[in-house]
Image (spheres, rainbow, N blue to C red):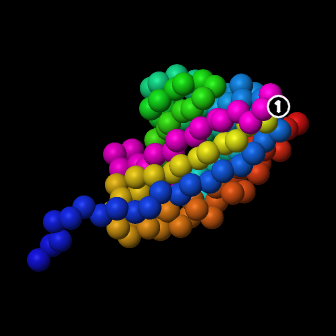
């Protein structure tokens, strides 16, 4: 018999402190995404040329490839500059886009004095991918976000 209780998979939470003011941290993470997001990846149609996050609710988060093609990775669900934003993450554990079952990423920008900001990132709702897919996706992003945040920090402090 099937268990009627919904599955829950713990969110991934990461934090990093950057030596830059809140507004700049927000701008680098969002509108400056193409300056620090890695150009490599799995299951892409061509090498990544840039990554763009459209700065508004309903805006796309998408990759542009060297061959001119584009792939939507997610959408902006909440847009509150320079404090926070929430976006969908439509990649699965096998790096395939599944727009109807994506997880979600929330990023908070918390000032720590005049020239520093703490970034609190929560990647959640993995259960939308099912138990196996959600667990694998959680493991993947849990290992990947620290390196991504370090790339962001380097660009924000440049």
Relative to 131, residue 36 above or below? above
Assign a secondary structure to mark 1.
loop
Query: Per the image, is 113 magenta?
Result: yes
User: Along the horizontal axis of the image, is 132 left or right of 25?
Assistant: left
Relative to 143, residue 103 above or below? above
Residue 139 percent location from the top left of the image: 53, 67
Foreground of the two, 27 or 112: 112
Structural crowding at the residue carrying mark 1, measured as other residues with C-alpha within 10 Å and reported as few (<14), some (14–19) or many (≥20): few
Q: Residue at x 45, y 52 (%)?
A: 124
User: Along the horizontal axis of the image, is 78 left or right of 45?
Assistant: left
Circle 1 sits on which residue?
115
Residue 38 percent location from the top left of the image: 72, 49
Residue 53, visible in the rendered structure: yes
Q: Residue at x 38, y 70 (%)?
A: 132
Query: Per the image, is 101 magenta?
Result: yes
Q: Residue at x 64, y 59 (%)?
A: 144
Q: Which quarter of the figure is the C terminus placed in?
A: top right
Foreground of the two, 80 or 63: 80
User: What's the magenta bit mostly, secondary-structure-wise?
Assistant: loop
Residue 62, visible in the rendered structure: no
Foreground of the two, 49 or 79: 79
Foreground of the two, 136 or 73: 136
């Amino acid at each position: 018999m099937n268990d009627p209780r919904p599955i829950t998979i713990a969110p991934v939470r990461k934090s990093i402190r950057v030596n830059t003011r809140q507004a700049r941290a927000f701008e680098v993470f969002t509108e400056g995404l193409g300056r620090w997001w890695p150009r490599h990846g799995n299951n892409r149609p061509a090498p990544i040329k840039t990554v763009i996050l459209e700065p508004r609710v309903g805006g796309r988060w998408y990759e542009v490839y060297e061959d001119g093609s584009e792939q939507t990775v997610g959408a902006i669900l909440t847009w509150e500059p320079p404090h926070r934003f929430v976006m969908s993450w439509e990649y699965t554990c096998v790096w395939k886009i599944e727009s109807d079952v994506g997880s979600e990423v929330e990023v908070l920008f918390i000032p720590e004095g005049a020239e520093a900001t703490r970034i609190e990132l929560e990647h959640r709702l993995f259960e939308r991918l099912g138990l196996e897919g959600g667990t694998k996706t959680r493991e993947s992003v849990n290992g990947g976000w620290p390196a991504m945040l370090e790339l962001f920090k380097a660009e924000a402090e440049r």
